[in-house]
Image (tube, rainbow, N blue to C red):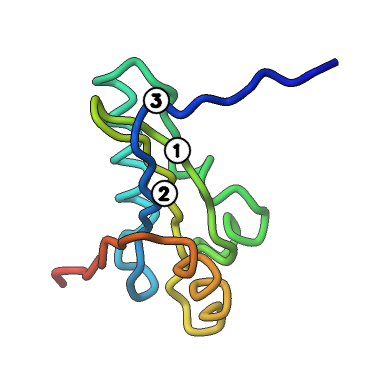
Amino acid sequence: MAKEKFERTKPHVNIGTIGHVDHGKTTLTAAITMCLGLKNGQATMDYDQIDNAPEERERGITIATSHVEYETETRHYAHVDCPGHADYVKNMITGAAQMDGAILVIAST
């Protein structure tokens, strides 16, 4: 069975969230998907769906990069949520290498 041909109708942008551990990168990613999902009738993702590996849930940190997608009226976004813990810098660099731009998340505390 042949797959449907994918046609891109909007410009595509690869972005991501980077920052130190526990500064809110995954929370921001979930909030972005929630806001755009509710506004545009798209699928939303909860925090638990982004960090879904058992060890990530147990430790409360992102270990592997997570990918989510969403759209605005003008663009399609592929969003990479990167780990912030020093032990997983290699995973963060792998995710950052895919990005056109990034959102640097810094806690205000």
Where does label 2 land, which residue? 79
For residue 13, above or below residue 65: above
For residue 100, above or below residue 34: below
Nearest the eye: 69 or 81: 69
Where does label 3 land, which residue? 9
Crowd band around label 3 with a 10 angstrom C-alpha radius: few (<14), some (14–19), many (20+): few
CA gap, disc 1 and disc 3:
15 Å
Q: Quadrant of residue 24?
A: bottom left
| Camera-side mark, 2 or 3 | 3
Q: Is residue 36 left or right of residue 85?
A: left
Crowd band around label 1 with a 10 angstrom C-alpha radius: few (<14), some (14–19), many (20+): some
Q: Secondary structure at mark 2?
A: strand
Disc 2 to disc 1: CB gap under 8 Å: yes
Instruction: Identify the residue at horizontal 36%, vertical 60% (top origin).
Output: 100
Residue 39 numbered tag: none
Instruction: Identify the residue at horizontal 29%, vertical 40% (top origin).
Output: 32
Residue positioned most to the left: 108
Mark positioned earlier in the residue sequence (2 or 3): 3
Inspect the image, locate mark 3, and give the three-letter code of the amino acid beneath it.
Thr
Instruction: Identify the residue at horizontal 67%, vertical 18% (top origin).
Output: 4
Crowd band around label 2 with a 10 angstrom C-alpha radius: few (<14), some (14–19), many (20+): many
Where does label 1 land, which residue? 69
Inspect the image, locate mark 1, and give the three-letter code of the amino acid beneath it.
Glu
